[in-house]
Image (cartoon, grey):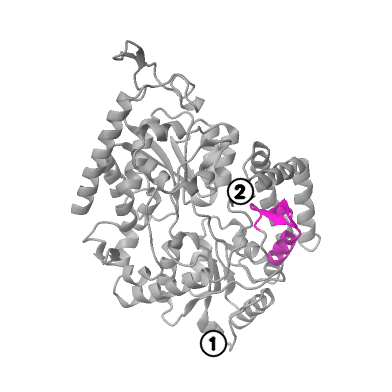
Amino acid sequence: MQRNGKRRTRGHLLLALAMIMAMLATACSNGANGSNAPGNDNNTPPTESAQQGDGKQAEADPYEGLPKKVSISMFDRGRVSSDEGTYEDNRWVKWIREQSDIDVSIVPVPRNQSQDSLNVLFASGQAPDLVWEYDRSYIGKLVTQGVIQPIGDYIEKYSTSYKKYLEENPDLLPHLTFDGEIYAVATKRPIIAIANHGMWIRQDWLDELNLEQPTTVEAFIEVAKAFKEHYPDSTPIVGHTSNDIYAAMYGAMNFLWYLEDGKMQYGATVDRFSEVIGLEKQLYELGLVDREYLTDNDNQRSKQLWTTGKAGIYLGQWGNGNVDIMTQDLLTNVPDAKPVPLEMVASPYGKYGAYQESSPNIFVAFNKDMKNPKAAIEYLDWMVDEGWFPLVYGDEGVHYNLVDGVPKRLDDDKFNKEVLYAGEYAVLRQQVVKPEDLLVMAADDELSQKIAKLNAEALKIALKNEFRRDIPYQPSFNEINEIRSTLDTFIRETRATAVTQGEKYDGEWALGEIRKEWERLGGAKAEELAQKWYEENKSGF
């Protein structure tokens, strides 16, 4: 690809410059971030001394002679077809190694158990050099556990491209900083990745039953009941973001902090959270959701029900990725189906938007035991500068052509098979997509253009109502992170009990149990710290 060759040449020049600067720099034996300094417990080799012009001895770069090898986690979403290979070994992993000049190895973790899987890898000493998550709070927990390290010195000393990106986007710094130190790198999300939750409904079912799209929680339930009655073999509501959708309706995400009358309160402990669980229980007891959805960790049952025309409402995303494939499969299997985006419905507390991500995209952190952080920085510099584009869009002339600077997909089926999974590797990217680009980017065949039009409408609807996020980013303290590592599991178990175990258990019971566990784990102290943090930082929000 000519375009990639030019970008690669520029990347090599920047890399060479960075290496020359690094070799000329004087390495300190104990830098500002202690865990970055040579000689600390991060498996660095002994340093050698070099004579400077002024007669002083300078320590050589401890990573200069090490193999340029880096391992990195990624989310296994089951997207790699057998003839493409595996997440660890495929055309794109080979391409990454060739183009970056880094020996990169991939460590997949299941998407829906990513944090649990990473925890096991850290506990067993097998975690990769680079780990990433969308959840900033999880990075905070890793900081608390002492399994990742500050990286500000590495960025300053070894980076060119990402350091420049961070200088141009200083508003990212608060999101990357914990305890006064930078512990992660991230780039900004394009708008298509910020508004990433949404609902879909079968308009043809509504038309057949002479029903309007629901606009309230109550109407949402009544429409689902009508679907169940008229289509008895159906499961009215399916989807992998059900819990987030219910919580967003009430402005009570269990993992976010809220301002309640000026006081910081954890989402799982606010009064409204009992109604979130109450709604989930009601839908379950009415038979309006799949009885096995709590164990459908890979979303395969939901996908099958939706794509075979056996479901009326899908709680997932506004479009993109797997949802695009699901829409395509549904329209192929049931040509008369009319899936359309559904606007979020109002709860007694008002109408909020579906969950939206904050500005940073993927948070990439450095394992404290990694052997060559310099190689990791070089890899991330290559990724943010040039590597991300082919991983997101494929090869020019094969998977896309540029139309007024916008990559236009040539064939959806070919892209979905050969490129879609590769986006998981693009952990840093300078991607900008405008809503009007969606139709340009889609392939020209009738089905692709139809899905693109639905996506454009879905994005418009996803952005129509503001998601309730009371503060731009979440506080991170040892006390808070330690609580969450235990509380998250407790919430899942308590919610499942309330939903499935009969009338003895309801939303009020679940909230009471969660509040007791919160207090037992030190919630009062966490609230005190969160309030102090809010008062100190609110002027900068």
Chain-order first, disc 1 or disc 2 = 1
Mark 2 is surrounded, within 10 Å at the Cα level, by few (under 14), some (14 to 19) or many (20 or more) other residues, namely some
Is residue 10 at all visible to an observer of this figure? yes
Q: Does the magenta stretch include residue 272?
A: yes
Q: Do the residues labelled 1 and 2 touch (CB within 8 Å)?
A: no
Q: Report helix, strand or loop for mark 2.
A: loop
Looking at the picture, how far across and down is residue 336, in whole percent? 44, 83
Is residue 1 at all visible to an observer of this figure? no
Mark 1 is surrounded, within 10 Å at the Cα level, by few (under 14), some (14 to 19) or many (20 or more) other residues, namely few
Give the extent of the magenta segment.
Answer: 253-281
For badge 1, the amino acid type reads: Asp
Q: Is residue 423 magenta?
A: no
Q: Residue 207 carries which label?
A: 1
Left or right side of 366 for 272:
right
Q: Which mark is residue 231?
A: none
Q: Which residue lies furthest to the top in this view?
A: 55
Residue ID at (76%, 56%): 510
Residue ID at (31%, 13%): 54
Q: Mark 2 points at which residue?
A: 474
Looking at the picture, how far across and down is residue 175, in whole percent? 53, 46
Residue ID at (44%, 23%): 43
Residue ID at (58%, 89%): 210
The image quadrant that residue 45 belongs to is: top left
Q: Report helix, strand or loop for mark 1.
A: helix
For badge 2, the amino acid type reads: Gln
Looking at the picture, how far across and down is residue 541, in whole percent? 59, 52
When the figure is inspected, residue 169 is found, relative to residue 378, above or below; the finding is below
Looking at the picture, how far across and down is residue 37, in whole percent? 45, 23
- 330 vs 383, nearest the viewer: 383
When the figure is inspected, residue 72 is found, relative to residue 33, above or below; the finding is below
Q: How many marks?
A: 2
